[in-house]
């Protein structure tokens, strides 16, 4: 063989290896924008063979403030200033060995339809994308991912739902009265099936994140996600993304190749949290139990991030700012909020609102009491640490509504629980910013908790859509999807019937629903659509009366509208005597029945209340 050819081949091969090696450089955030309020940016540069300990930026507009070589030489952290002279374009990051990679600064998008925030005039619809609609079967499975199979016969496996499926149902959601969509995490979960208890579980739910800058390709691409957000915005719908600050999947690159020793909360052996939020505000609490709450790992395959480490904190703050800008979302729901470092939580909330003043962030704080819930948001409590997030998921109210429909009426039982819970709203700075709900992807489904009783279903839904706060419903609630967490969470995450072409029934269509399901859907649709146009229900003052004989009466009042709501949880018909409510009524009103869509004829100044019923009247 010709020696020149051999030398050329070897040279080309070595050059290819060298280029391939440099192609393995990863920079986080992957790109950034000019025009941000904060001019500071911290890059994390990673290479599996090591990163040179010095760099320079070739073009003007970016100044290097500090370079930090991590414990692990595979990582370099670089603090930058984005100068006022910076322009959109590619910037060369040049290493001390003369090699370089490129980093892009983009121009921020200016649009009135992005980062709108979610308010009390919204109705949130919670979707687990894998279980909603399969709009693109070609992305169901990939041979290069750890979990290679989609199998609808296995409740613990992936099923194939995706962004294309959500896009295809935006009109359905808008017709039903939904204004906002909350998606469980959409980022890459490249994990094999993991053992939880006795079951081998897939990460179909999205909470095992392995790449924070790439959506899971079984849902679509980053561009497909942008298309979903834009399509939703074009129809007047908002998008909430699910964030996980507390932990990552065990196949995340920062776990497989730790940047520094204290990147994670480490223990001599596996240690989980006790899940008791009381340790944060209990004056008698011990430090070790607080430490376990903040640093314990949920399960062995979900490493717990040390958010008190400034580099970890910067990484998490920047990636959430990045995702908000990159995808144009309107809000965040933060998973496992109460398990995160408290100073970090205030810092990330301030950073997000600084860049996106209208953005909504609400934390999942699964608490046992109203004081516990209020502790994790802006509150009127005298406590050592003051949280600054504007709202939380209101678990105490959810529990009270379940007691209202299932417990007999009593001094502190049944519907009285709702009254007592709302009476403690003085603990919150603004209870209107709490996200209220009947169920979610971690709980028994509401229709099952209501005993599959349509009257109880209507009471629960009526309360949800007329009490203060931002209401959230779980996908399928409108068509009576049901089940208990038996044997585990997968049982309450069934596919939406009609979301796959092979489905025998299609619950998205009235013709595919039973009479009872259509009854529930129409009730949901009427209330939801009425609510979003009602100033009293969305932002009005709440006035409630002490429940008597299982009957709970409350008003929602704005300067433009007055609404009367009545719940009868008794097993017999009762009467509402209007003379008992002269503080709210003057005796000359007419009453428009919102559900029946007709004006009520009041006889003898009273309104009949059927047993186990919810009624709502607009007072004219």
Image (cartoon, rainbow, N blue to C red):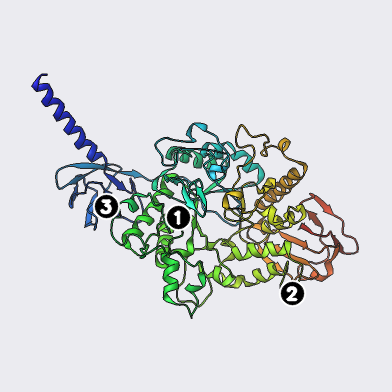
Q: Residue furthest right?
A: 604
Front residue of 199/312: it is 199
- Mark 3 to mark 2 CA distance (whole Å): 64 Å
The residue carrying mark 2 is 411
- Graded by Cα atoms within 10 Å as few (under 14), some (14 to 19) or many (20 or more), the crowding at tag 2 reads few
Nearer the camera: disc 3 or disc 1: 1
Which is closer to the viewer, label 3 or label 2? Answer: 2
Rendered location of residue 96, percent (x, y): 15, 48
Tell me the distance, in whole angstroms, between the alpha carbons under discs 3 and 1.
31 Å
Marked residue nearer the N-terminal end (3 or 1): 3
User: SS for tag 3?
Assistant: loop
* Residue 304 quadrant: bottom left
Q: Which residue is mark 1?
A: 244
Residue at the spot 29% in from the left edge and 52% down from the top edge: 44
Q: Is any atom of residue 271 visible in this view?
A: yes
Where does the image place residue 399, in percent across and percent down from the top left? 64, 64
For the question of whether residue 84 can be seen, the reply is: no
Element under disc 1: strand
The quadrant in which the N terminus is found is: top left
| Image coordinates for residue 131, horizontal then vertical, percent | 57, 43
Element type at mark 2? loop
- Closest to the observer: 505 or 549? 505
Which residue does the numbered mark 3 point to in the structure image?
A: 83
Around disc 3, counting alpha carbons within 10 Å, would you say few (fewer than 14), some (14 to 19), or many (20 or more)?
Answer: some
Return the x and y of residue 292 as percentages of the image width and height: 43, 68
Mark 1 or mark 2, earlier in chain: 1
């Amino acid at each position: 063989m010709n020696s020149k050819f051999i030398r050329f081949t070897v040279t080309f091969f070595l050059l290819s290896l060298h280029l391939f090696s440099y192609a393995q450089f990863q920079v986080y955030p992957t790109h950034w924008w000019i025009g941000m309020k904060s001019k500071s940016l911290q890059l994390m540069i990673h290479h599996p063979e090591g990163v040179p300990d010095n760099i320079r930026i070739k073009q003007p507009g970016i100044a290097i403030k500090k370079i930090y070589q991590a414990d692990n030489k595979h990582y370099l952290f670089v603090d930058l200033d984005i100068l006022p002279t910076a322009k959109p374009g590619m910037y060369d990051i040049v290493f001390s060995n003369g090699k370089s990679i490129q980093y892009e600064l983009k121009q921020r998008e200016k649009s009135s339809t992005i980062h709108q925030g979610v308010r009390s005039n919204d109705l949130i619809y919670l979707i687990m994308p894998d279980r909603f609609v399969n709009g693109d079967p070609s992305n169901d499975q990939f041979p290069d991912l750890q979990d290679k199979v989609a199998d609808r016969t296995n409740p613990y496996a992936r099923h194939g739902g995706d962004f294309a499926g959500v896009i295809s149902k935006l009109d359905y959601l808008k017709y039903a009265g939904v204004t906002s969509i909350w998606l469980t995490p959409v980022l890459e979960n490249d994990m094999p099936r993991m053992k939880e208890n006795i079951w081998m579980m897939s990460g179909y739910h999205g909470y095992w994140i392995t790449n924070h800058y790439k959506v899971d390709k079984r849902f679509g691409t980053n561009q497909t996600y942008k298309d979903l957000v834009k399509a939703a915005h074009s129809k007047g719908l908002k998008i909430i993304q699910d964030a996980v600050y507390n932990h990552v999947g065990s196949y995340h690159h920062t776990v497989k190749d730790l940047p520094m020793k204290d990147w994670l909360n480490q223990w001599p052996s596996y240690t989980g949290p006790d899940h008791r939020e009381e340790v944060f505000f209990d004056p008698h609490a011990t430090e070790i139990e607080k430490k376990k709450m903040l640093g314990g790992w949920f399960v062995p395959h979900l490493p717990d991030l040390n958010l008190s480490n400034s580099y970890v904190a910067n990484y998490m703050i920047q990636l959430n700012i990045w995702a908000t800008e990159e995808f144009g979302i309107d809000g965040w729901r933060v998973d496992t909020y109460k398990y995160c470092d408290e100073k970090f939580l205030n810092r990330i909330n301030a950073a997000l609102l600084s860049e996106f003043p209208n953005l909504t962030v609400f934390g999942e704080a699964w608490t046992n009491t109203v004081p516990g819930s209020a502790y994790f948001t802006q509150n009127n409590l005298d406590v050592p640490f003051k949280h600054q997030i504007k709202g939380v998921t209101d678990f105490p109210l959810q529990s009270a509504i379940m007691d209202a429909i299932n417990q007999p009426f009593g001094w502190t039982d049944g519907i009285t629980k709702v009254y007592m819970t709302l009476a403690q709203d003085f603990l919150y700075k603004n209870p209107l910013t709490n996200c209220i709900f009947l169920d979610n992807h971690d709980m028994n489904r509401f229709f099952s908790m209501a005993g599959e009783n349509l009257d109880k279903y209507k009471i629960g839904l009526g309360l949800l859509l007329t009490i203060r706060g931002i209401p959230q419903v779980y996908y399928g609630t409108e068509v009576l999807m049901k089940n208990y967490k038996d044997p585990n969470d997968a049982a309450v995450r069934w596919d939406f019937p009609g979301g796959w072409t092979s489905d025998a029934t299609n619950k998205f269509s009235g013709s595919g629903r039973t009479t009872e399901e259509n009854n529930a859907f129409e009730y949901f649709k009427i209330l939801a659509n009425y609510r979003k146009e009602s100033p009293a229900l969305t932002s009005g003052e709440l006035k409630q009366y002490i429940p008597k004989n299982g009957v709970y009466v409350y008003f929602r009042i704005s300067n433009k509208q007055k609404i009367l709501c009545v719940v009868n949880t008794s097993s017999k018909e009762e009467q509402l005597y209007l003379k008992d409510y002269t503080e709210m009524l003057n005796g000359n009103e007419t009453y428009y029945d919102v559900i029946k869509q007709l004006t009520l004829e009041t006889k003898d100044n009273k309104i009949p209340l059927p047993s186990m019923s919810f009624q709502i009247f607009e007072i004219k």
